[in-house]
Image (cartoon, rainbow, N blue to C red):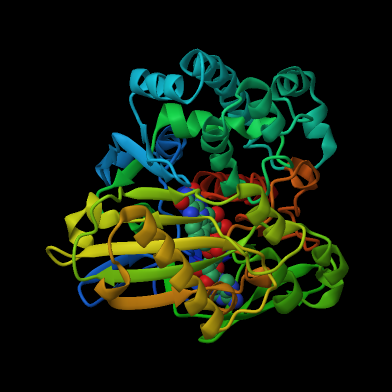
Amino acid sequence: MESKRSVGVIGAGFSSLYAACKLALSGYDVTVFDKNRMVGGRAQTFTAEGFTFDMGPSWYWMPDIIDKMFEEIGVKRSDYYNITQFQTAYQVFWKNDPATKVPADRKELMSLFDTLEVNGGQKLDKFLQDAKIKYEVAKPLMELPGESLSELMKWSVIKNAMKLDVFKSVEKDVANRFNSDKARNILNFPVLFLGAMPDEIPSLYTLMNYADLELGTWYPDNGMSDLAKALEKIALENGVQFHMKSNVLSIDVEGDRVQGLTTSEGSFEFDFVLSGADYHFTEQHLLPEQFRRYSEKYWSKRKMAPSSLIYYLGMSEKIPGLEHHNLFFDEDLKEHGREIYENPRWPEKPLFYSCVPSKTDPKVAPEGKENVFLLMPIATRIEDTPEIREKYLEIMLTRMEEQLGMSIKDKIIYKQSFCIEDFKSAYNSFQGNAYGLANTLKQTANLKPKMRSKLKNMFFCGQLTVPGPGVPPALISGKIAANLIIEAS
Ligand SMILES: Cc1cc2nc3c(=O)[nH]c(=O)nc-3n(C[C@H](O)[C@H](O)[C@H](O)COP(=O)(O)OP(=O)(O)OC[C@H]3O[C@@H](n4cnc5c(N)ncnc54)[C@H](O)[C@@H]3O)c2cc1C
């Protein structure tokens, strides 16, 4: 009997986990190595003083895509975990004006936009109809492996791609349709997930507004780790072996083929290797130079999505006035953007995001207490010291106190920060980025780093490859990479 072909997977982020499930279901012998103690990659959790913190992603968007990804590996997501939609998707704080709560209900949302500008509801309706077309057209395009331009030159793709407005920016599209600052800010916000300013992101990505305002913001019963744990369970059920706290030290090559991996536990031989770890790290640190597809010069020219300053805070009391998701848009979005992309430095007047999962999930904080996650996007490659982190915590908390009209600083009973240097040490992240490459036109589709290595039996997946950053795209990239391995076998 022919023995099973083996695959060694580097990393246990969402892309690697999905690829591991798909490959195991297709008859491969799969072993996953991750340097961290738990699966999920950037979606780790930790518990301290009775608080449980989701360390990375907190917005569960595009539930339709995630459900479909489960179906494609033969299971139902609902058999693994439950999700609930928020009726108030999120809250936006403005300067000198009351906060806006963005409702899930379409009629309420249209009424809200009517209060923001004349015919706002009607304009929004038309905008979301157009965004829906982009979402539906883009879904199959997201699954293209990005191997060559010819994938995009097929008539069926070109015909549909014309509907995508790739040469107009999100900002222009939004500004042409809406004139109030608030409507514009609400509609420009989701693309910030894509790691560039709205004036640089192709209008195709208004599909994110459809995901935001039409498909809604959801929460798994135990936070984002539910998705990672579900994929881990499916993988284990199908024979995948996990080596956690196992650092891959080198990819071992003979001739034009990978032989296996050397890890902190020893050496392992594989027929194929798939890396879902940071692409730059994998090539520059694990592969001998002659087998690297990209040079340091190439990487130095990439435009990275931001890094983040994150604080995980435990509060002694509930903080009224906050929702599960809160955007502090009470300073100028463009100015902060310039300090990330054009003139990289710590921002003068930052915008930031606060997730308070204890508002809807009592399990994440002791009774009567509040779990607060603060995230401020910053440029990669800037200085990161404990003093700077503290300075910006003070700025964010002062702004929250002003907005909420109450003291907050004196309620902190637990505090932990995470920033550029931690992204590097925890995830080997290139320049300490949080969300991979910026999704500008020049770094989209086949212009992203290739999934196929120079070596015949080695592949890449993850947020630096197609289709890009975010949890649903990471899952899709795992699927595409697994298919490439299956084709190459
Ligand atoms: C703070 C933050 C907030 C986010 N918010 C959202 C959100 O709300 N919604 C959303 O959809 N997306 C969000 N994202 C983006 C999303 O989390 C990522 O795009 C996605 O999780 C990336 O998955 P991945 O598989 O590419 O890799 P990663 O999650 O980066 O996993 C790669 C793994 O490889 C491991 N590794 C690296 N080197 C080695 C080595 N040598 N040996 C062994 N293992 C190694 C790393 O430790 C890591 O565990 C957020 C990201 C961050 C950081």
Q: Position of residue 355 (x, y in %)?
A: 37, 55
Residue 31 drawn above or below residue 254: above
Left or right of 408? Residue 115 is right
The foreground one among 393 and 380 is: 393
Q: Residue furthest front?
A: 96
Image quarter of residue 141: top right
Is residue 304 visible in the rendered image? The answer is no
The foreground one among 52 and 370 is: 370
Q: Position of residue 10 (x, y in %)?
A: 57, 68
Is residue 433 visible in the rendered image? The answer is yes
Image quarter of residue 296: bottom right
Residue at 59% across / 38% down in the picture? 188
Residue at 43% across / 26% down in the picture? 214
Residue at 33% across / 70% down in the picture? 313
Q: Position of residue 325 (x, y in %)?
A: 37, 48
Residue 442 drawn above or below residue 283: above
Left or right of 366? Residue 211 is right
Residue at 29% across / 55% down in the picture? 357
Residue 8 drawn above or below residue 181: below
Q: Position of residue 263 (x, y in %)?
A: 57, 82
Residue 465 drawn above or below residue 126: below
The foreground one among 253 and 364 is: 364
Number of residue marks:
0
